[in-house]
Image (cartoon, rainbow, N blue to C red):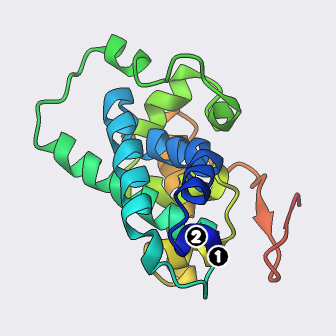
Amino acid sequence: MAAAVAGDRSALEQLLRAHHDSVRAVCFRIVIDRGGAEDATQAALLAIARSIRRFKMDSKFSTWVYRIATNAALDEVRRAQRKAVPTEDESLGRAMPAGADAADGIVESMALQAALAQVSEEFRVPLVLFHLQDMPYEEIAEVLGIPVNTVRSRISRARQQLRVILGNPGPPPDRHTQDPEGHRGTP
């Protein structure tokens, strides 16, 4: 990382390769549309490459990368909202990337993928970062520039929206709890 920040092109390429799948996974879950997610992934990787020299090593590199990926994905969502959105059910099937990799495991079925697409952006983004990227609340708060309690609230609301969309409005047991020290566990 230090070499990339110092201008070593080979080190930068190595960093981009190492973080490509994570950036891609975040973009796919926020944007939902395959083409838009690919565009967001490329935009994020370009933004990382262009601004690597400005990275101040006072925070985690992955947090900085996720912030850039999230912003690129949200920009793509906003661009897509200005376009006509297809409404046929088959278009939802195209939202899942072909040859899904391990990072795509959070959404195991097309029904859940389609439901995730219906969750409002404000709530979907922290949910994706929490479940897909396994980020603690504090890091999500840093990436999104919002308080930790707002992150908790938005994840809770995203889960509620998903339950309603999937036809199960009752509160299920929370499978991903977090203790005050930020460690994950099950209740």
Callout 1 crowding tier (Cα within 10 Å): few <14, some 14–19, many ≥20: few
Q: Quadrant of residue 99?
A: top right
Going 20% across and 22% down the picture, which residue do you hit?
86
Residue 24 in the figure: left or right of residue 107: left
Number of numbered discs overlaid on the protein picture: 2
Please state the horizontal and vertical placement of residue 150, each as a whole percent of the image.
50, 77
Dot 2 lies on which element? helix
Instruction: Judge by depth and name the residue closer to the eye, 4 or 148.
Output: 4
Amino acid on which the number 2 mark rests in the picture: Thr
Q: Quadrant of residue 75?
A: bottom left
Going 63% across and 51% down the picture, which residue do you hit?
14
- Quarter containing the C terminus: bottom right
Q: Are marks 2 and 1 in contact (CB under 8 Å)?
A: yes
Please state the horizontal and vertical placement of residue 40, each as a whole percent of the image.
35, 45
Amino acid on which the number 1 mark rests in the picture: Lys
Whether residue 153 can be seen here: no
Residue that carries the numbered disc 1 in the rendered image: 60
Going 54% across and 77% down the picture, which residue do you hit?
141
Looking at the image, residue 165 lies above or below residue 14: above
Q: Which mark is residue 99?
A: none
Please state the horizontal and vertical placement of residue 126, each as a whole percent of the image.
52, 61
Residue that carries the numbered disc 2 in the rendered image: 63
